[in-house]
Amino acid sequence: MNPGSVAIALVNDTDMQVCEIYETAIAYAVFGDPQPDLADPWYDLRVCSVTPPSAAGPARGFSVRTSHGVEDLVTADTVIVPSVPDAVVNQGASLPAEFVDALRRAYDAGARVVSLCTGAFALAEAGLLNGRRAAAHWLNTADLAKRYPEVEVDDSVLYVDEGRVLTSAGMTAGLDLCLHIVRHDLGAHVANQLARRLVVSGHRPGGQSQFVDLSVPVTDDDSLAPVMDWAARHLDQPLTVDGMAKQAGMSTRTFFRRLQAATGMTPLKWLLNQRLAHAQTLLETTDLPIERVSEFSGLGTAANLRRHFTLHVGVTPTDYRHSFGGAPARRNVLADGRR
């Protein structure tokens, strides 16, 4: 399966600030480094400068050199706008007209258009967010909504997938969206393996909140990781919140509160996501019957797997296997439900 070409649009390539560099690097890390052992071919990446080359050099930040220009956006399969300059967001400065026009032409030609963080301002200026839900960093969503009233701005979610138009909140939420795109294009197994290489969570749902309850310490909590790993290795067994809390050595109330603070999900929602992710991996890497996939992922009957899979993934398990299942790996891979 060829995932096609990806163009990263650099609106500001001669005075990039740390956040702009960070979000650009996220897109480059996901789509720019070939992963032939995961998928071959990988994405064909081009970094495109929106502004003409300048001999002045960077004023305060970093500069990026590239041989691709704004017209190279138009022919890409996916166009990503990682950010726009601070002056556009906070001072109402205009974006280059040729860039806005290129975004429209790329979309009209069938491209998938993506923004990370403040890149949403560019998509909104091009009219591509009109009548759609959109995400951006919560610090900027009020300005985005005021400036573009036809956009349904959601200031709470990590990212929004509207088909050929996708938007994310700032910073690491951009990585979540990029991995979501890889998951859509190349399957859950590839996305999960790539996430492991990037040392990040394989799948944070777009509807997860941008906000974390800082009153609950999660980064130094050594008690959650073991029980989450234990649960992921016993998905074929009946698991309850009380049982996971007991495994963690916590009261049910404390466990519920800590897991929700760490993941943005209730324990049962987190567990369902783990079961579905495991089912995706089994569908991609084995030729196990659907009934066995449902059993090993802990979803019970094949009918229950189909219901949850269609609701949360958007296709039936059989259709998913047809799209992402390659040559089956060993038939008994993960056959005991443990990873």
Image (cartoon, helix red, strand yellow):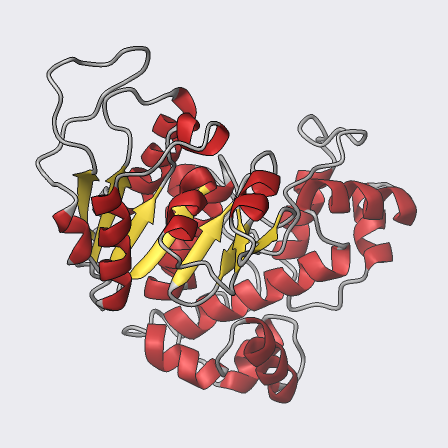
Residue positioned 75% across, 28% down in the render: 217
In the rendered view, would you say 239 is above or below 291?
above
- Residue 37 seen in render: no
In the rendered view, would you say 195 is above or below 299?
above
Where is residue 108? Give x, y as percent: 26, 67
> Taking 33 as reference, is 144 left or right?
right
In the rendered view, would you say 147 is above or below 334?
above
Where is residue 293? Give x, y as percent: 53, 77
In the rendered view, would you say 115 is above or below 215?
below
Q: How many marks?
A: 0
> Taking 213 as reference, is 69 left or right?
left
Q: Tell which of 155 and 38 is nearer to you.
A: 155
- Residue 86 seen in render: yes
Residue positioned 85% across, 48% down in the render: 246
Q: Outermost residue toward the bottom?
A: 303
Where is residue 261? Give x, y as percent: 75, 41
Where is residue 311? Give x, y as percent: 60, 77
> Taking 29 as reference, is 336 left or right?
right
Residue positioned 46% across, 33% down in the render: 89
Q: Quadrant of the N terminus?
A: bottom left
Quadrant of the rendered image containing residue 215? top right
Q: Tell which of 156 and 108 is nearer to you.
A: 108
Residue positioned 18% across, 56% down in the render: 74
